[in-house]
Image (spheres, rainbow, N blue to C red):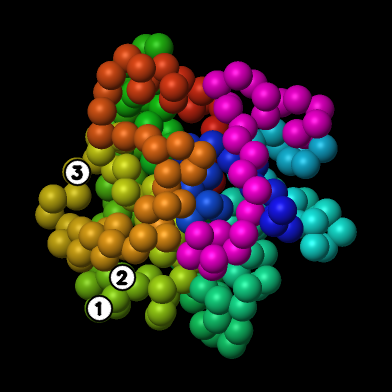
Amino acid sequence: MADIDLYTWATPNGWKASATLEELALPYNLKPIDITTGIQKSPSYIAINPNGRIPAIVDHSADSFAIFESGAIMIYLAEKAGRLLPTDVKGRSRVIQWLMFQMGGLGPMQGQANVFYRYFPEKIPAAIERYQKETRRLYEVLNTQLSDNEFLAGDFSIADIANWSWTRIHNWAGVDIDDLPHLQRWLKQLEARPALIRGAEIPHPSNYSRTTEQDEEKASAVRGIVTR
């Protein structure tokens, strides 16, 4: 058995943890948390993640230490493995800045765009436009950063994984990136990394390009997904 238990589901925040584990080649035990059933609110899971969201990990090699919040998980894993996060002060700061960009900006805004565009029982054009426009603005920030940089913060890092996990499903939020060439180049480059693709198929493959009733039913718990 591996030392790390991963509690997750097929969402961008879930991919952030699973893709990081795959990139770092850290063995883990998969513990699927089907958020459509409400199991994330069970007392046994709340004991691991007080916020009742996915993902979370438990590191049994460190006295069964539990970590919640996707960004915190990524930092912990990168430090544990000694990869994907520089150790020098400036390099580390650059990566964390772009990680926080996703945590505090892209995740919340695109998450709300997803909700109002796909799932909200009432179509509210002003809300849809507000969140789609802000998501698009954040994509433009990424595009500008990537115009002179292969990756977001020096070498490939957890910052790239975090932003990729959300940006790769831009279509699900109804946001177009056809005129953002640097962002497109970066997405294609990251999609060519086998470890990232493996991570994005945990705990099961999903297709956010489709809008069938079955897909929407599977994702109907999006209102309960923390968008950070």
Q: Amino acid at mark 3?
A: Asp
User: How many residues crowd mark 2 within 10 Å: few (<14), some (14–19), many (20+)?
Assistant: some
Amino acid type at circle 2 is Gln
Disc 1 marks which residue? 148
Q: Rounded to the nearest whole Å, what is the CA distance between mark 1 and mark 3? A: 22 Å
Toward the top, the furthest residue is 121
Cα distance between the residues tagged 2 and 3: 18 Å
- Is-magenta flag for residue 31? yes
Q: Is residue 197 above or below residue 38?
A: below
Residue 222, x across and y down, in percent = 48, 27
Q: In screen coordinates, is 161 left or right of 51?
A: left
Residue under pointer 3: 176
| Numbered range of the magenta stretch | 21-46
Secondary structure of the residue carrying tag 1 is loop
Residue 38 placed where, x, y %? 64, 21
What secondary structure is found at the residue carrying circle 2?
helix
Q: Is residue 104 visible?
A: no
Seen from the viewer's position, the closer of residues 193 and 159 is 193
Q: Is residue 193 left or right of residue 102?
A: left
Residue 145 marker: 2
